[in-house]
Image (cartoon, rainbow, N blue to C red):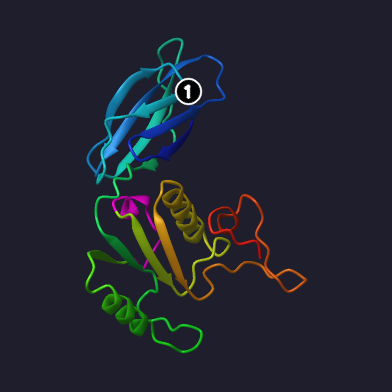
């Protein structure tokens, strides 16, 4: 089966589909904070499930299996992350510069880090040095304001970048406030007219209101 998970402010919604025609329901598994998976619903007979027992500050992974009319359980879906956006902590400052990179104008990223840390020194904030891989939804879920700075986050640059953009999209749609700063964070393929254009369906168009 295919599983889609939508994180929310009070609960987490699961959407399940299968190409099989003899399905009578889905068995739903949930992992909390890297503990073993547990069954939270033995037989969900709908294609949607609302997890109202999930709480803020926890990281959840979900997977589902299809149960056919002979009560045979199929193979599990892929695992999907879900969180409840509690937004009950201070700001988060996310450093995705990989520590030693230089900005295009030759400014050492340590200077940028020092600037933000001094600017926020009187505020309640969490510093996250995120050097490798994509940004996870859980890392932002308790913070109502996120400042993300990087040398390069591009949705068409790598899989990690695409996942990071999807994370930021969900964060904004849940009501989070985002400041994204850095060099080449929004760039894409340069078309023949010399301008980069972002269409509906693109994170930069839909969530940052940037057309070109």
Residue 92 is situated, as x and y percent measured from the top left of the image, at 30, 62
177 over 118 or under it: above or below: above
Residue 144 is situated, as x and y percent measured from the top left of the image, at 33, 54
Residue nearest the viewer, comparing 71 with 83: 83
The part of the image, by quadrant, that contains residue 116 is bottom left
Q: Is residue 165 left or right of residue 58?
A: right
Q: Which residue is mark 1?
A: 47
Give me the residue at 49% from left, 57% from top: 165
The part of the image, by quadrant, that contains residue 117 is bottom left
Which corner quadrant holds the C terminus? bottom right
Q: In terms of secondary structure, where does tag 1 sit?
A: loop
Tell me where the magenta segment starts and ends, as one range. 130-142
Residue 131 is situated, as x and y percent measured from the top left of the image, at 36, 69
Was residue 114 drawn as part of the magenta stretch in this picture? no
Residue 168 is situated, as x and y percent measured from the top left of the image, at 45, 55
Asked if residue 134 shows in the view, the reply is no
């Amino acid at each position: 089966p295919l599983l889609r998970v939508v994180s929310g402010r009070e609960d987490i919604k699961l959407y399940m589909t299968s190409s099989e025609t003899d399905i009578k329901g889905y068995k739903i598994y949930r992992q909390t904070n890297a503990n073993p998976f547990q069954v939270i619903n033995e037989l969900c007979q709908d294609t949607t499930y609302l997890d109202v027992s999930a709480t803020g500050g926890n990281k959840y992974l979900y997977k589902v299996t299809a149960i056919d009319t002979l009560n045979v359980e199929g193979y599990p879906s892929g695992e999907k992350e879900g969180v409840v956006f509690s937004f009950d902590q201070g700001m988060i400052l996310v450093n995705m510069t990989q520590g030693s990179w230089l900005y295009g104008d030759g400014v050492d990223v340590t200077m940028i880090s020092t600037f933000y840390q001094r600017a926020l020194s009187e505020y309640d904030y969490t510093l996250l040095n995120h050097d490798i891989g994509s940004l996870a939804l859980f890392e932002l879920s308790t913070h109502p304001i996120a400042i993300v700075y990087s040398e390069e986050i591009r949705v068409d640059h790598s899989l990690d970048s695409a996942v990071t953009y999807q994370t930021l999209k969900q964060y904004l749609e849940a009501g989070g406030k985002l400041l994204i700063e850095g060099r080449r964070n929004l760039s894409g393929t340069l078309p023949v007219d010399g301008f980069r254009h972002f269409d509906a369906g693109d994170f930069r168009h839909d969530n940052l209101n940037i057309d070109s």
